[in-house]
Structures are given as C-alpha cells and as structure tokens.
Amino acid sequence: MSDDLMALRDKIVEAALPHVPFDGWTPRAARRAAADLGLTRADAMRAFPYGAADMVAHYSDLADRRMVAELERRDIASMKIRERITTAVRVRLEQAAPHREAVRRALAVLALPSNVVLGGKCLYRTVDAMWVAAGDRSTDWNFYSKRSLLAGVFSSTVLYWLDDRSDDMADTWAFLDRRIADVMRIPKVTGRVRSFVDRLPNPARLCRPGFRYTPRTGA
C-alpha cells in the first residue's frame, strides 16, 4: 500500500468516526467523511473498496499506531512490566473514549461469522503491539502465552468499558487492575509446576502434556 493511500485511509476513517454512530461502518459514513474533507465519493471508494470490514480493520490499525506513538512518548521503560501493560491498555481505551459508540459498532461488524478471522487478526495485532511497546522480546512459548493472556484481558476490559458510566472510568480501571493481577499470577504458578516437573526422573517427563505451548491454527 502506498503512503498516499495509507494517509487517505487514515483521514477518511478519522473523519468518519462522528458519522458511525448514525450510519454505522458503511460506505455512507465513508462518503460523508470524504465530503467533510473536501474529497469526492470516488476518493471514499478508492480508500475503502471492501466496505465495513475494510474500514473497521483500518480503524483498528490506526488506533494501534496511535497507541504505540503515545507509549513511545511516555517513559514506560522505567515501569514494571505489569504497569507497562496496564498503561498500554489504558492508553488504547482513553484514546478511543470520544468514539465509544464507533468501537461498539466495530465489534458488531467483527462479530459477524464472515469476519471472525479478521476480528482475531485485529485482536492479535493490538496485543502484539502492546507487548512490543512494553519491551517484550520473547521468541519461545512465552511469546504466544503472553499474547493469548493479554487478548483475554483486553477483550474483557473493552466489553466492560463500553458500558461503564463511572466517573473517569474508575470502574473500568479497577476491573483492568483485577484482570492484570489474575494474569500475573498464572506465569508464577506455571513456573513452579515446570520447575517441579523438570526435577523429576526422565521417564516421568513423558507425562508432561501442556507445558510446551503450541498455538492452535485458527483458534
């Protein structure tokens, strides 16, 4: 994709956000966004020829890039890993806060049977961006387990956030802290189990199913 087309898609998605609560993620919203920018219907079609799913996927990508840019401006390297991940999730949601209904409608698009795979890709890209921004450089089974666990945390937090009416989203941040705390306990327990099994005689190691994480295709 050329830089010019990427920039066009960014501009139209951003301009479409105020229209999405009324028109959904539709070509109509894209056309209205183009008109707001002084562009033509042809520009809207060129930017998003594949409709709603195309627009939602690009919105997710744009949100990821903006989240990473904000995290780079912050001194998260000095934080503990738990604080880095918590900050990443908070930044992602805080940036989306003015357009919460657009996020709700985006999730509805991704929940359609025809878009399930796309939804998984968007979720993976988001949590991967969070871990990379947090300084994760793992390449073994931890790479997959970290992203799988964070995917669950992020997904559940987004759903909670969508209906949160507390002041300054205090309930959402408390919910996020609890989910992160739960996740941080899992590697510790797993590490103790792995350490115990590694000390067993070799024949007993034949009974070690589940400790080497292998991602399931299509999961």
Image (cartoon, helix red, strand yellow):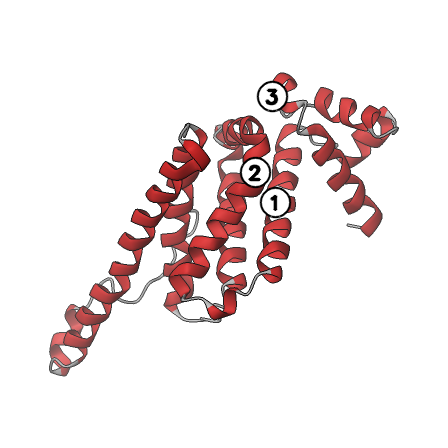
Mark positioned earlier in the residue sequence (1 or 2):
1
Q: Residue at x 59, y 49 (%)?
A: 64
Q: How many marks?
A: 3
Taking 159 as reference, is 209 left or right? left
Mark positioned earlier in the residue sequence (3 or 1):
3
Quadrant of res 204: bottom left
Residue 87 drawn at (x, y percent)? 47, 54
Instruction: Identify the amino acid type marked 2.
Output: Ala
In space, the residues marked 3 and 2 are separated at their CA atoms by 14 Å
Instruction: Identify the amino acid type marked 3.
Output: Pro
- Nearer to the camera, 94 or 119: 94
Quadrant of res 197: bottom left
Contact, CB < 8 Å: mark 1 with mark 2? yes
Per the image, label 1 sits on a secondary structure element best described as helix
Q: Which residue is mark 3?
A: 21
128 to 191, vertically: above or below: above
Q: Which residue is mark 1?
A: 63
Residue 195 drawn at (x, y percent)? 19, 76
Per the image, label 3 sits on a secondary structure element best described as helix
139 to 30, vertically: above or below: below
- Nearer to the camera, 206 or 64: 64
Q: Residue at x 83, y 24 (%)?
A: 35
130 to 156, vertically: above or below: below
Mark positioned earlier in the residue sequence (3 or 2):
3
Instruction: Identify the amino acid type marked 1.
Output: Ala
Residue 133 drawn at (x, y percent)? 54, 62
Taking 106 as reference, is 194 left or right? left
Q: Nearer the viewer, mark 3 or mark 2?
A: 2
